[in-house]
Image (cartoon, helix red, strand yellow):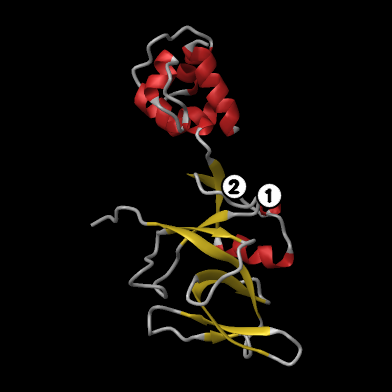
Amino acid sequence: MSLANRVKSRRDALGLTQTEAAEKAGIRQQSWASIEDGSTKKPRNIISIARALECDAGWLMMGDNIQPVHDINTKKLPLISYVQAGNLVHSVPITDCDGEFEYILTDQELSQSAFALKIEGDSMEPDFKSGDVIIVDPEIKPHPGEFIVAANNEREATFKKYRPTRIDANGNEHFELVPLNSDYPTLSSENTPLMIIGTMIEHRIYRRKR
């Protein structure tokens, strides 16, 4: 397989157009096209091209034994908004939500409904700061003390600590959503209709701008 074929196969695997891939790599679409048609054999921007294709630059150039990320037990997760997460309570598939998605990669074994969410606000500080990313799996039942994404009847999603309180006579479990920042109130399912969307299974912290 040639450089041109490896670049095209990775782009196709990620579902990107030439224009989208070129934008991610910071080059012109015409330059990308010249790589895929074989005109350019040694692109100067191979590192940024590999980054855009989420694979190893050495593999792109040489086709050696270095595997692209796509071949290493990875899964693409949509990075959705709080509004999109809230819609999941009403069985709205992620693919039907309005707006385009960014994606992140994970090597965790997750359900098909798993997604990523970028933290907003400061209600979960100091452990979770605005801009951090969490990975959530709707098919994992939370244990006491774990962190969950939940929503109310207004389709407003929130990220909080899960604390079960009691099971009523009808077998319904009641719980509280506890913020880590004491400036925010604890929410109770007995006072506000709350529905659990999913359980956090990974927390990603990125370098913060000074």
Location of residue 49 with respect to 113 vertically, above or below: above
Q: Nearer the viewer, residue 48 or 176?
A: 176
The residue shown at (51%, 18%) is 6
Extreme residue toward the left, this view: 210
Please name the amino acid that badge 1 sits on. Answer: Thr
Upstream in the sequence, badge 1 or badge 2? 1
State the residue position of label 1. 95
Callout 2, which amino acid?
A: Glu
Q: How crowded is the residue under tag 2: few (<14 C-alpha within 10 Å), some, or many (20+)?
A: few
The answer to whether residue 167 is left or right of residue 16 is: right
Residue 178: % across, % down: 48, 81
Q: Secondary structure at mark 1?
A: helix
Most extreme residue toward the right, as rendered?
170
Total marks shown come to 2
Is residue 139 in sight in this rendering?
Answer: yes
Q: Residue at position x 39%, y 64% from top?
A: 130
Question: Under tag 2, what secondary structure?
Answer: loop
Above or below — where is 102 with respect to 2?
below
- Residue occupied by mark 2: 100
In percent of width and height, residue 60 lies at: 43, 19
Q: Position of 157 compared to 2: left or right?
A: right
Marks 1 and 2, how far apart at CA = 9 Å
- Across and down, in percent, residue 210 comes to 23, 57
Please tell me which residue is depicted at 55% across the width and 59% down the height of the picture: 136
